[in-house]
Amino acid sequence: MGTVRSLTLILSVFAAVGCISLAQGQTEPNLELLGAESFEAAAVGALPEGWSVEFGREEDVAVTGAEAYEGDRSLHLVDSSQTASTGLRSPRMQVEPGSAYWVRAWWLGDAGNNASVYIEYWDATGTRMQEHVRSYGVSGTGRWSRLLTSSVAPEGAVAATVLLYSSSTVTTDGYFDAVEFGVGVPVLFDRTPQPPAEVDHPVGLYTDADIQRAKQNIERHEWAQREFDAIKSRCEWWMNLPDEEIATWIPEGTPFRVCDCPNCGAAWGVGPWTFLSDGRTQCKRCDTIYPNEKFPETGVEEHVNPLGQREQINSYVDADGKRFRLEGLRKYGRINKLGNLGWLGRAYALTGDTAYAEKVRNVLLRLAEVYPAYIAHDWYNIYPDYSNLQSGKMSGWKLHDATTFIELCLAYDLTVESGVYSDEDRSLIEEGAFREAGRLLTSTSPRGYCVNDGPFLMAAGGYIGKLLGEHDYVAWAIEPPNGFFGFIEENFWRDGHWEDGSPSYELMALNKFYVLPEIMQGYTDPPSYEGRDRYENLDMLANPLLSKVLVAGMYVTSPDGHQPANNDSTFGANYPARHAEENYFWFPTERNLRLMAHAYR
């Protein structure tokens, strides 16, 4: 089903809206244990040998027998102050610069009781190397949660410590147990490809009936033929790209969006870049094209990727030491093309031409090869895992990954039964592309980094879950308090308007809002899932707010089509008529039909 996929517009149906490397079948490397603390040897009320309270009061940190992940004891940490921190530091352990080190710990706290684990490095003078300290958060969930991460010892480091910590800005009450530190890089997920998901396609936005209706509209109506031609036109770039060039446009190595122009200083945030058709980049302000011999990209950073491998990131470094990740920027410009792949799925569904399906298959196989190794990062920081709320793999914000994967899900869903995919192809694509994206998204809250990106994340996570038959991904997307059902209650007013009263941000939140309700309406878990929380004929539209959110903006739209520029909204924000279509599709009443007619007047 689509927005108004049941109406008479083809626009409603479609326009509204290899060789596998170590990315597959990654195995756990040998990890050498350098230090471990189970808290079993210390007396209740005491501290483990060699550990010291470096922040806060000693009475707030002690071994206890009240809870334990393993054995009978754990470390109880209490931070009752919002102005002072609490922390327990391990003994120092010898390290070698350039080597990777891992830490694993278990945390038990109720919801809202969070903590952090730090890896601290020390130089030969005994000084803490502040700029190389790495912190990793672990959230209270009411059950034992594992933290597993790694970092590389910097030049000059001779020792490392583990710090169990609660910061000065929060309060917490919880337990640490089974803390381990060692050399090597842990692999966070088992990426062995599984058999293809036992799912009857299509499962997403478009049903077989929708597709048949679209075909009939094309035969009957000139406007439908024009929309059909537009769909095929949107496919031309990928269809004209030789298969041997796919790897150039879905590159190996992490893409980076954040890069200023080293020639004129134009800041990345003002959108200074044009991505040229040959894969190069050009600054809009000074017209400089990169790569450029005046700005040699000889600077090298080395980071450990999610597969435990080391990735070298090349950059230009100016006289002040500022890095410009120009190569990563070019990769970002290229991989943006993935967002158009959904049109090939639509074109295949309408034509049955397997050339479209073949191209989708080839693109997804390449993505499955390289995507797992992309390093999670936000605008300015790189992370060893997927626990940061903002960080994505494609640009520095997982909003990019989410919006792209909505289209990739659609492309795969509409072509997977075309006959061009082998079972091996399906296993590799589902593991390396969709399951990996699912891990990235579901490792943090579906509410998103800035809240109004939440509907994008929920839509992508839910779509991936339905595509793979994964109950846990679906539950992550919809269950309160953070999933869709809780999200709409907290972030929409009773009249249907977005919580911050800004038309622009309301439009952002509603951009892909329709996806999750439409693909999940009537959802039932696969027979293989027998949990007590299985879904049967899920009703996504039961909440009365759903009948308001898509048309609330219509009531504040002036005769010129614009909404008021208040609360940080942009001037000229308008009400998209397609929202009225979506509303009528969900709730086909006479009043909503008239609202849709008004929107398209």
Image: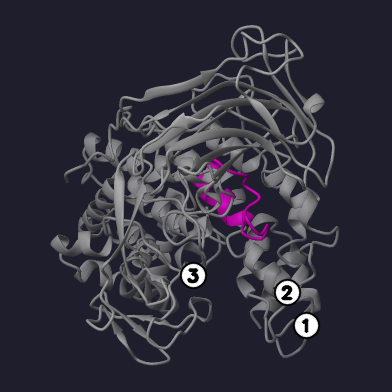
Where residue 173 sits: x, y (%)? 78, 29
On the image, numbered disc 3 is attached to which residue?
A: 11
**In this rendering, is residue 383 above or below 298?**
above
Name the amino acid type tagged 2: Pro
140 in magenta = no
* Viewer-proximal residue among 415 and 125: 125
Scheme of image coloration: one colour
Q: CA distance from mark 1 to mark 3?
A: 28 Å
Q: Between residues 208 and 168, which one lies in front from this camera angle? A: 168
From the image, tell me which residue sits under label 2. Answer: 503
Judged from the image, the secondary structure of the residue bearing numbered disc 1 is: loop
Specify start and end residues of the magenta stretch as a single range.
442-463
How packed mark 3 is, by other alpha carbons closer than 10 Å (few <14, some 14-19, many 20 or more), is many
Label 1, label 2: how far apart the Cα atoms are: 7 Å
Report how far apart the C-alphas of labels 3 and 2 lie in the structure: 24 Å
Per the image, label 2 sits on a secondary structure element best described as: helix
Q: Residue at x 43, y 68 (%)?
A: 257
- Residue at point 41%, 79% (across, down): 222
Q: Nearer the viewer, residue 88 or 403?
A: 88
Could you say where residue 353 lies in the image, as x and y percent from the top left? 23, 59
**In the rendered structure, are the residues bearing label 1 and label 2 in contact, judged by CB atoms less than 8 Å apart?**
yes
Q: Earlier in the sequence, mark 3 or mark 2?
A: 3
Query: Position of 49 compared to 493: left or right?
Result: left
Identified by mark 1, the residue type is Pro
Q: Specify the label residue 564 is tagged with.
A: 1
One can see residue 277 in this view: yes
Disc nearest the viewer among 3 and 2: 2
Q: Position of residue 77 (x, y in %)?
A: 74, 27
- Residue closest to the eye, 282 or 517: 282
Question: What mark, if any, has residue 231 been given in the picture?
Answer: none
Horizontal side, residue 552 vs residue 50: left or right: right
